[in-house]
Image: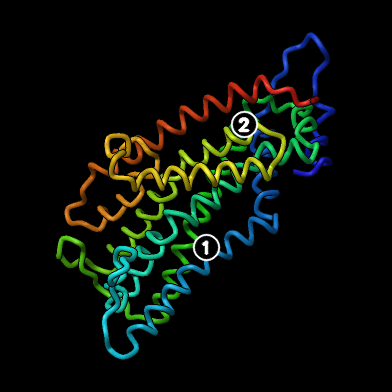
């Protein structure tokens, strides 16, 4: 947010000794300003461009690999789920792209945006101007978190739409076979793809709250972003160590790929509900920690 935008509502600040009441319209205006600022940054646009490029590269790679009539598959080195079905139905590229980006690209992007949310403002010197305006620290923090969550949704939809477009161009579309072996219509599959995209976006709630908390600990946006991304990588490494199997169900990344259960018939809800519940828990814990830190933060230092 620019300094001019932050300072614009300053004239509405009441005098000392009076109760400061904030209009809901100001809250929506603050959110709109945050969204506009976030999505106008070149860094944000670059992140979205990288996310959009992943399905393109996957689709082209599968097309080249299957050009001689062979089937695509994980092979000896493994690979994202659904990749062997892409040649039969381009809609599977959506599921494959989300499975490929969720472990690293999507959370890294969220970590960058969330890590810069508070620390970036502090480093630029605009945080104190934001708090002079009648927003309040709690309201500002909630607005920042809402902005990050909107970015989560947009980033996920960028991957899904890019994958659907590439899949429609390179591969046939039509009825598809679920993991359970049943056939569903293309419209049903498209609806499930949308549900999967929403679940993937919701799966990043914990990362968003973690990044926001880290952002309140420092005045350096770069340090906050690097710390958040480093924590993401560390947690995912720990999630792959067999000796830590007792702790792994509590890692925020453990159930990320449970969205594949939406492609079963009937849908398996156990891991999906565990994932969403775990994300809500992380959001509550780190959101509370961010609030406790931010409300006591000395912005004049």
- Evaluate if marks 1 and 2 touch, with contact meaning CB atoms under 8 Å apart: no
- Report the Cα–Cα distance between label 1 and label 2: 27 Å
Q: Residue at x 44, y 63 (%)?
A: 160
User: Helix, strand, or loop for circle 2?
Assistant: helix
**In this picture, residue 60 sits left or right of residue 230:** left
Query: Which of label 1 and label 2 is nearer to you?
Result: 1
Farthest-out residue, front: 243
**Percent of width and height locating residue 294:** 64, 25
Q: Position of residue 84 (x, y in %)?
A: 27, 72
Identify the disc placed on residue 289. Answer: none
Q: Is residue 283 above or below residue 106?
A: above
In the structure shown, which secondary structural element does the residue marked by tag 1 occupy? helix
State the residue position of label 1: 51
Camera-side residue of 239 and 95: 239
* Residue plotted at (40% across, 40% down): 252
The number of callouts visible is: 2
Using a 10 Å C-alpha cutoff, classify the residue at mark 2 as few (fewer than 14 neighbours), some (14 to 19) or many (20 or more).
Answer: many
Q: Quadrant of the N terminus?
A: top right
* Quadrant position of the C terminus in the picture: top right
Furthest residue in direction left, as rendered: 181
Front one among 56 and 195: 56
First along the sequence among labels 1 and 2: 1
Q: Position of residue 241 (x, y in %)?
A: 33, 45
Displayed quadrant of residue 139: top right
Q: Which mark is residue 141?
A: 2
């Amino acid at each position: 947010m620019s300094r001019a935008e932050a300072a614009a509502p300053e004239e509405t600040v009441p005098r000392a000794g009076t109760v400061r009441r904030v209009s809901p319209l100001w809250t929506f205006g603050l959110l709109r300003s945050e969204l506009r600022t976030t999505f106008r940054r070149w860094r944000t646009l670059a992140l979205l461009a990288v996310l959009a490029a992943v399905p393109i590269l996957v689709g082209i790679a599968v097309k080249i690999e299957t050009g001689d009539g062979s089937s695509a598959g994980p092979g000896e080195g493994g690979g994202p789920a659904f990749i062997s079905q892409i040649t039969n139905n381009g809609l599977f590229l959506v599921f494959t792209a989300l499975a490929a980006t969720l472990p690293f690209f999507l959370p890294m992007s969220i970590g960058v945006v969330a890590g810069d949310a508070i620390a970036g403002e502090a480093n630029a010197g605009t945080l104190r101007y934001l708090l002079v305006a009648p927003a309040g620290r709690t309201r500002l923090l909630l607005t920042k978190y809402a902005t990050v969550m909107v970015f989560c949704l947009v980033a996920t939809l960028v991957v899904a739409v890019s994958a659907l477009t590439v899949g429609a161009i390179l591969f046939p579309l039509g009825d598809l076979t679920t993991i359970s072996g049943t056939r569903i219509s293309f419209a049903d599959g498209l609806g499930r793809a949308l549900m999967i995209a929403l679940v993937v976006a919701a799966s990043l709630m914990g990362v968003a709250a973690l990044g926001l908390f880290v952002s309140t600990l420092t005045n350096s946006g770069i340090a906050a972003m690097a710390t958040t991304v480093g924590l993401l990588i560390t947690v995912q490494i720990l999630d792959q160590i067999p000796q830590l199997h007792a702790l792994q169900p509590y890692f925020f990344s453990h159930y990320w790929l449970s969205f594949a259960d939406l492609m079963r018939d009937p849908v398996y809800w156990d891991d999906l509900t565990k994932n969403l519940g775990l994300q809500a828990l992380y959001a509550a814990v780190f959101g509370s920690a961010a609030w406790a830190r931010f409300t006591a933060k000395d912005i004049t230092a």
